[in-house]
Image (cartoon, helix red, strand yellow):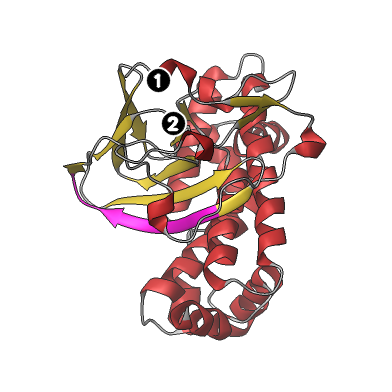
């Protein structure tokens, strides 16, 4: 325990020097259990899609609920637990300066009997932001979650240039997480912000519903312009963009995890016409639903 105050190691570096590399990116569905105490050589973002997790770290137990993530720093002893059944997670291991050689997942977790102090990765720090490790639990905006999902896709498929794509996407994730430190609720909008977050969660659960701006404004009992401004401030995307992104995320999940036809998946995410669904999917993903399913299953 005496070494813990030293970690995470930090390096003050201008943003142009940040060069993150991805070591692991994966979806998981886990049942309630307490995992082993451990330390990492790199950093991990563990995002909860659905359910609840918890992390013990630095003498505190942190609840990590749906829509939140925990930031796990290199060298800091911690223990994760899954609290709710069928908890859906997205995990990304990374470093800030492309400094850890990883041949297998075993290279990420410290074996305390053979711990190598030279392998612990440094956390980047740049003014005016505080280091991310100062905040155990964060609530990323939907746009940030979308970037994390794109990292999983790139890292899993590994097309030509995927390392460059992952680096770019991770920089986007880090910038959005850092900006949370300066995000302030719009004046007088605290109650509305809570209601918008509830509505965002409902859209994620039922993306096939008709979520037009007039209907959203009516649900929130405000005019359309005010609703759109508040919604974008909370979600990081305009309402229409968020609905399309939510539908696309669910379509990708169903293509990966089910044997449903593309036509049926289109219906389940709000597109009654197969050709229109295919056009929208290709525009956002770069490939057809059929090609996406084939690629995800080959890999």
Expressed as whole percent of the image width and height from the top left, the position of residue 296 reads 49, 77
Question: Depth check: 145 or 94 in front?
Answer: 94
For image coordinates 65% across by 70% down, the residue present is: 285
Q: From the image, tell me which residue sits under label 2.
A: 75
What secondary structure is the magenta-colored segment mainly? strand
Q: Which residue is mark 1?
A: 3
Identify the element where label 1 is drawn.
loop
Which quarter of the image is occupied by the N terminus?
top left
Q: Is residue 69 left or right of residue 241?
A: left
Q: Earlier in the sequence, mark 1 or mark 2?
A: 1
Q: Give the residues in magenta.
A: 23-32
**Separation of disc 1 and disc 2 at Cα?**
9 Å
Please identify the quarter of the rendering in which residue 243 is found. Answer: bottom right
SS class, disc 2: loop
* Residue situated in front as seen by the camera: 286 or 107: 107
Front-lying residue, 83 or 200: 83
Q: Which mark is residue 51?
A: none
Determine the residue positioned at 67% across, 78% down.
279
- Farthest residue in the left direction? 33
30 in magenta: yes
User: Would you say residue 80 sits in the magenta stretch?
Assistant: no
Placement of 4 over or under 23, stated as above or below: above
Residue 237 in view, yes or no: no
Mark 2 nearby-residue class (10 Å; few <14, some 14–19, many ≥20):
many
Crowd tier of the residue under label 1, counting other residues whose Cα lies within 10 Å: few below 14, some 14–19, many 20 or above = few
Q: Does 11 appear above or below 267? A: above
């Amino acid at each position: 325990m005496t070494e813990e105050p030293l970690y995470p190691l930090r390096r003050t570096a201008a943003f142009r020097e940040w060069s993150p590399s991805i070591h692991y990116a994966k979806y998981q569905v886990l049942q309630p259990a307490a995992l082993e105490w451990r330390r990492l050589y790199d950093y991990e973002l563990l995002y909860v899609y659905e359910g609840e997790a918890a992390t013990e770290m630095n003498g505190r137990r942190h609840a990590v609920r749906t829509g939140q993530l925990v930031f796990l720093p290199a060298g800091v002893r911690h223990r994760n637990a899954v609290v709710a059944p069928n908890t859906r997670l997205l995990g990304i291991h990374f470093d800030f300066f492309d400094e850890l050689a990883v041949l297998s997942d075993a290279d990420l977790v410290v074996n305390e009997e053979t711990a190598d102090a030279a392998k612990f990765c440094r956390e980047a720090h740049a003014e005016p932001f505080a280091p991310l490790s100062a905040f155990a639990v964060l609530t990323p905006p939907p746009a940030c979650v979308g970037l994390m999902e794109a990292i999983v896709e790139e890292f899993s498929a590994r097309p030509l240039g995927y390392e460059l794509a992952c680096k770019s996407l991770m920089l986007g994730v880090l910038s959005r997480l850092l900006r949370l430190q300066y995000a302030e609720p719009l004046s007088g909008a605290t109650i509305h912000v809570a209601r918008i977050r509830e509505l965002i969660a409902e859209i994620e659960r039922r993306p096939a519903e008709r979520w037009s701006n007039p209907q959203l404004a009516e649900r929130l009992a405000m005019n359309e312009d005010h609703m759109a401004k508040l919604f974008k401030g909370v979600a990081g995307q305009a309402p229409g963009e968020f609905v399309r992104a939510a539908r696309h995320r669910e379509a990708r999940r169903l293509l990966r995890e089910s044997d449903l036809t593309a036509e049926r998946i289109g219906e389940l995410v709000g597109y009654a016409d197969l050709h229109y669904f295919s056009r929208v999917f290709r525009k956002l993903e770069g490939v057809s639903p059929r090609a996406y399913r084939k690629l995800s299953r080959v890999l």
